[in-house]
Image (cartoon, helix red, strand yellow):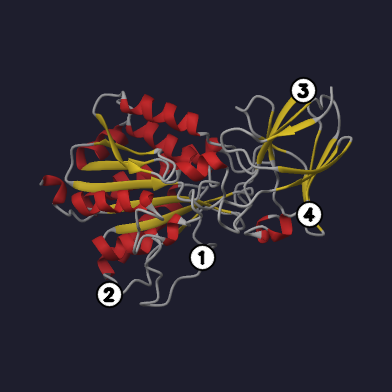
């Protein structure tokens, strides 16, 4: 068989530059109407038992070139089990080496989370007892903004993920959170649903996810820079979600992401917003400290620098939502690289670890739920 490369599928992204036997020269395609690129996902066929050398030639021009050193590409031959393979970055190019055991092998920046799996997740979870479904709006490509609801409590809890579509670990985290929250035999889930009303948007950027984008929606908008003034023409995804938040209130929100360069799990807060409420900030820090004690996969030493007082960018979700609603708001970041504190030499940071981290986050939320503010809007 002749070796072939293809990315014409849900979430796929690659361009073939040149092929020399089992040495493949490829480029990652930019997000539509944007200069962002880093996400790749493609399949190679006809290479059984051949030592592939795959060279991504434009890696140095990507959105986050600091993400390539010590990074390892993911590969799967069944699209279920994703493992790392030999990868090195030098002279501005990323080289991936792998010898397939079969005639089909898939390569990706991180284990993909397809829109088909998203639709399966929404259908599976919405069919469980006590779970509601709301369509908050439509994307520019006409896809639905799916929101799952559950719980009977007064506090309004929001979980949103995958504003940046290439950060697929965020939706793996969501799958873990939803599975725990709907487990009838889980005492943490039962407590949380008794104490709070959950509003969960597992994928904030369906268009970018389908198109194989790293960071933007269909028109090239970075949704996590649209929360101050979202518009129907540029960021209908954010507009739909924020309008619903205005209607029902927000007491706690976690915005789930992945970071290209930092090999750790960490949280970012809202310390730089104007008129920072000390009690509000104290609750964020308490959550972060408790999670660090509870989960070996989480740490507090590495992460983003804190904003100076009053200097927060209110276009970012975490800052805008903390400022707008006085909510306990936070951004959770997981790595594309391995986790330096607890390395896994076979799979690095993985879908499974993302799902387990969600369980840990919910356990800490349950421990603190009585300390959170109550907006009262949900009662109306």
User: Is tag 2's residue or tag 3's residue first in the polypeptide sequence?
Assistant: 3
Residue annotated with mark 1 = 304
Res. 309 image quadrant: bottom left
User: Mark 1 vs mark 3: which is more N-terminal?
Assistant: 3
Cα distance in 3D space between marks 4 and 2: 46 Å
Which of the pair 202/284 is nearer the observer?
202
**Which image quarter: residue 191?**
top left
Crowd around label 4: few <14 · some 14–19 · many ≥20 (10 Å): some
Relative to 370, is 227 on the left or the right?
Answer: right
Label 2, label 3: how many angstroms apart (C-alpha)?
59 Å
- Is 257 located above or below residue 104 in the figure? below
For residue 275, which numbered disc appears in the image? 2
Cα separation between marks 1 and 4 = 27 Å
Q: Residue at x 20, y 56 (%)?
A: 373
Front label number (2 vs 3): 3
Q: Is residue 39 left or right of residue 26?
A: left
Describe the element under mark 1 as helix, strand or loop.
loop
* Mark 3 burial class by Cα count in 10 Å: few <14, some 14-19, many 20+: some
């Amino acid at each position: 068989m002749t070796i072939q490369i293809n990315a014409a599928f849900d979430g796929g992204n690659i361009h073939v530059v040149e092929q020399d036997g089992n040495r493949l020269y490829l480029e990652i395609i930019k997000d539509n109407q944007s200069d962002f690129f880093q996400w790749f996902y493609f399949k190679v066929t006809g290479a059984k038992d051949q030592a592939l050398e795959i060279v991504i030639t434009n890696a140095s021009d990507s959105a986050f070139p600091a993400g390539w050193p010590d990074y390892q590409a993911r590969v799967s031959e069944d699209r279920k089990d994703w493992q790392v393979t030999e990868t090195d970055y030098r002279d501005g190019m990323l080289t991936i080496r792998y010898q397939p055991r079969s005639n089909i092998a898939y390569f990706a920046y991180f284990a993909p989370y397809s829109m088909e799996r998203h639709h399966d997740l929404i259908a599976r979870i919405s069919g469980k007892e006590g779970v509601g479904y709301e369509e908050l709006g439509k994307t520019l490509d006409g896809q639905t903004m799916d929101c799952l609801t559950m719980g009977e409590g007064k506090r309004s809890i929001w979980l949103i993920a995958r504003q940046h579509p290439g950060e697929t670990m965020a939706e793996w985290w969501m799958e873990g959170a939803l599975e725990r929250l709907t487990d009838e035999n889980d005492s943490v889930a039962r407590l949380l649903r008794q104490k709070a009303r959950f509003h969960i948007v597992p994928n904030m950027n369906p268009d970018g996810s389908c198109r194989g984008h790293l960071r933007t929606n269909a028109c090239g908008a970075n949704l996590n820079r649209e929360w101050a003034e979202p518009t129907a023409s540029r960021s209908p995804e954010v507009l739909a979600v924020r309008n619903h938040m205005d209607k029902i209130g927000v007491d706690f929100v976690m915005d789930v992401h992945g970071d290209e360069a930092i090999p750790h799990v960490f949280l970012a807060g809202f310390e730089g917003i104007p008129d920072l409420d000390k009690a509000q900030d104290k609750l964020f820090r308490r959550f972060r400290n408790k999670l660090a004690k509870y989960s070996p996969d989480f740490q507090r030493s590495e992460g983003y620098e804190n904003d100076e007082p009053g200097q927060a960018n209110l276009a970012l979700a975490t800052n805008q939502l903390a400022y707008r609603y006085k909510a306990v708001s936070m951004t959770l970041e997981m790595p594309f690289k391995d986790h330096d504190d607890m390395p896994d030499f076979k799979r690095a940071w993985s879908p499974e670890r993302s799902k387990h981290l969600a369980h840990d986050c919910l356990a800490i939320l349950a421990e603190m739920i009585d300390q959170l503010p109550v907006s009262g809007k949900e009662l109306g």
